[in-house]
Image: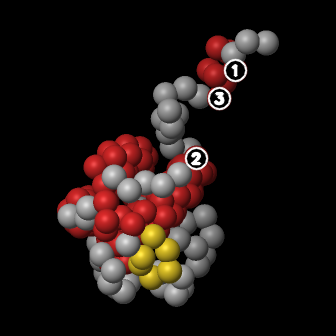
Amino acid sequence: MEIVEPAEFLRYHARIRERTRRVATLIPRDAVEWTHQAGKFTLGDLVRHLGAIERYMFAENARLRPSSYPGHGRELADGYEAVIAYFDRTHAETVAILASLDAAGFRAQCETPGGARLPVWKWLRAMLEHEIHHRGQIYLMLGMLGVSTPPLYGLTSEEVMARSAT
């Protein structure tokens, strides 16, 4: 499916980000740098990574520039409030960049950090898939901590089963 209307993409992107932000704000303040295994992303790393990769890789490539991804370390944002603020700020910057593109900009060929050339709209579709992947990790890690999380689309699997025909 070709996505070349920036306004349509941005509306969809906003809904995805809203769901990701909702779960990110459930991270306990004392668990921002918690990880399930040494050497793996912490919860804070995941949120910083989503902010940084969206802004400094995907958005830069979308405007036909090379990636300037700074990583996901605590030097970018340390502590719960700073991590959420970084996530919000980088997202706002990304939205402004993407909103400046027209349909021709969405069809333009960009180059990914791996050297692949593809239409911007396909690269941005990969950005959404990437965010959803990491959102799932946040859900899983919060579950490991015993944090109750909301169902993604309003119903739990048990509620869907109860409402389904047998």
Up-down: is 22 above or below 166?
A: below
Q: Residue furthest front?
A: 104
> Which residue position holds label 2?
143
Q: How far apart are marks 2 and 1 (CA)?
A: 21 Å
Mark pair 3, 2: CA separation: 15 Å
**Residue displayed at 48% across by 64% down:** 122
Q: Which quadrant of the figure has residue 82?
A: bottom left
Residue 35 place in picture, x, y as percent = 55, 66
Whichever of callouts 2 and 1 sits on the residue coming sooner in the sequence is: 2
Amino acid type, label 3? Ser
Residue 55 or residue 41, whichever sits in front = 55
The answer to whether marks 1 and 3 mark residues whose Cβ atoms lie closer than 8 Å is yes
Within 10 Å of the Cα at label 2, are there few (<14), some (14-19), or many (20+) other Cα atoms?
few
Picture coordinates of residue 108, whole percent (x, y): 38, 72
Whichever of labels 3 and 2 marks the residue nearer the N terminus, that label is 2
Q: How many labels does the image show?
A: 3
Q: Can you say whether 66 is above or below 4 in the image?
A: below
Disc number placed over residue 157 in the picture, else none: 3
Q: In which quarter of the image is residue 31?
A: bottom left
Task: Provide residue 59's location: percent of width, then percent of height.
Answer: 33, 71
The answer to whether residue 105 is seen in the rendering is: yes
Look at the numbered disc 3 and give the secondary structure of its residue.
helix
In front of the other: label 2 or label 1?
1
Q: Residues within 10 Å of mark 1 (few under 14, many from 20)?
A: few
Q: Which amino acid type is marked by label 1?
A: Met
Q: Residue at x 25, y 64 (%)?
A: 101
Residue drawn 64% across the image and 22% down it = 160
Question: Element under label 1?
Answer: helix
* Residue 38 found in image quarter: bottom right
From the image, tell me which residue sits under label 1: 161
Q: How many neighbours does mark 3 have within 10 angstroms: few (below 14), some (14-19), or many (20 or more)?
A: few
